[in-house]
Amino acid sequence: MRPRVWAPRAREVALDLPREGRRVPLRQAGDGWWEADLDLAPGVRHAYAVDGAPPHADPRAERLPEGVHGPAEAFDATAFAWTDTGWLGLDARGAILYELHVGTFTERGTLDAAIEHLDDLVALGVDMVELMPLASFNGEHGWGYDGVSLYSVHEPYGGPRALQRFVDAAHAHGMGVCLDVVHNHLGPSGNYLGAFGPYLTDAHHTPWGAAVNLDQDGSHEVRRWICDSALRWLRDFHVDALRLDAVHALVDDSPQHLLAQLSVEVADLAAELGRPLSLIAESDLNDPVAILPVAQGGWGMTAQWADDVHHAIHALVTGERHGYYVDFGSPQTLRKALTQVFVHDGGWSAFRGRHWGRPLPPGTDGHQFVVSASNHDQVGNRALGDRPSARLDPGALAVEAALVLLSPFTPMLFMGEEWGARTPWLYFTDHPEPELADAVRSGRRGEFGGHGWEELYGGVVEPPDPQARSTFEASRLDRGELRDAGHARLLDWHRQLIALRRAEPELSAGDLTATRVRFEDAPADQASSGWQGWLVVERGGARVVVNLAEEERRVPLQSSRPLEVRAAWSPVRVEPPAADDESGHVVLPGRSVVVLA
């Protein structure tokens, strides 16, 4: 590795070699870059001192074995012995995604430990594992969204070589890997970017403070810093997709948006490697610009998260109306979400207090939207980190699974959801600095001030201390739950639905125009248990029939061809069309769901 660092405003830069106890002056190499005419062997610890200041690891450091405050270590990503030469790649669109947090997915909380459970994911039917952020952050455990090094892998998870082992193993199991990356902000501890150059700017602001510099002086190299990190994961670590966190916070007034630039460069790399590479954006904008091709003025993302679909399902089934669920909960809203994706597509958003969003162009592929009934945000940002399984009956969980997994979108499960895990998934941090720890505690309490948690939970709510080790430990999955027949039954139900999605083209198609939703005129606001009634999601000629009422319902199928039961949560009865009735019916118990095709 040749020492090289970007420090455009520096007068002098020195390479610090702490184990050797010496410093080597760097020479200017043009365009703000500094370098030395020597090679660092893999394993050599090093940092850079700018204008005599204390040394810090390069913003492009590939390994931080001593943590974010320590020196970098030279790492040779090309030295790994890959076994996936036969891997042809996987497009994320239409795949079954599975989101997991490495630190709480297993008892050991490492990438190597996660490899031991890849067989379970294969048996479930997962196509692509989505890893929550791995970028190095201060402390041992956290969600990963406060990382400070785009190029390194958090050491407690096993470091960069462990990630290569994980990806190689996933490919051997026939699964792709998506890596969650955060480009919109840096964490509060261990962020030494300002010591090197204008990585941040006060010209724009985000919820986390100063924005990443994408359009001001020096932004060209900052954009390269981001794009090169993304390309590195895809090229040197064989990752198949990147999930880009909160892209609405990437404030960019330059002629070409950063995401459009990244999209073009990733497409070029995919052509070079001969395998598909996907970019999945998390966006709060409800704007098709994210997935529109660059040639049409869009950002060219492969897909984007669709929170409105989650909200529509969750509010309908649970009856929750607090916070951003205020505009959701009716079957009419679910119908719009399942057929048009964006519930807010230019109309009024009561939660935001303004008109919001834009409609999708006709013909948009539903597979360009990742949907879920649970994910790290929707569970972890609840006051008590409670999953739907903590409050819903098994039948309602079966309904949610069917609505997500048999939708015209790209479905995603959150770790443990497949068996109805009862362990919470809480917000946890491990900031060593007392003042930062106190700020996180008070901020978390303040965040829940006006969200209606007292009404939901039946009293004053004190969110668990994010800094307490017990908060982190409580969030670990407990696979011992699978010994319970109820959890095992729900796991089998998820396996059935995924297999059925693969077997029936109509249930996996992304054609939004082939999706229709019919429903019973039933009570629309049952805050304790959600909407009470039946609904039918028509997927071409197939039918997903849901009964959220407590009592048995006889539901018209409105099908011109015979239908057979392909999966049923509870025993059902199919009645063929009568002489005076063109439609057959299905009779199903309360709190149940059946799939016919």
Image (cartoon, rainbow, N blue to C red):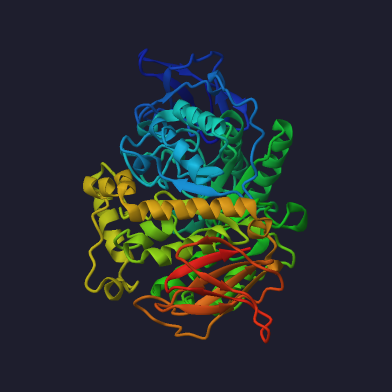
Q: Position of residue 229 (x, y in %)?
A: 56, 36
| Residue occupying the point 70% across, 31% down | 273
Most distant residue in the front direction: 579
* Residue sitting nearer the eye, 158 or 89: 89
Q: Position of residue 268 (x, y in %)?
A: 72, 38
Q: Position of residue 287 (x, y in %)?
A: 63, 65
| Residue occupying the point 47% across, 76% down | 329
Tell how many labels.
0
Kindly tell me whether residue 93 is visible in this rendering: yes
Q: Is residue 98 above or below residue 459?
A: above
| Residue occupying the point 47% across, 48% down | 99
Kindly tell me whether residue 208 is visible in this rendering: no
Q: Which quarter of the figure has residue 227?
A: top right
* Residue sitting nearer the eye, 132 or 500: 500
* Residue sitting nearer the eye, 546 or 138: 546
Q: Is residue 574 above or below residue 112?
A: below
| Residue occupying the point 22% across, 64% down | 462
* Residue sitting nearer the eye, 546 or 448: 546
Q: Which quarter of the rendering shows the C terminus? A: bottom right
Q: Position of residue 319 (x, y in %)?
A: 40, 75
Q: Which quarter of the figure has residue 222?
A: top right
Q: Which quarter of the rendering shows the N terminus? A: top right
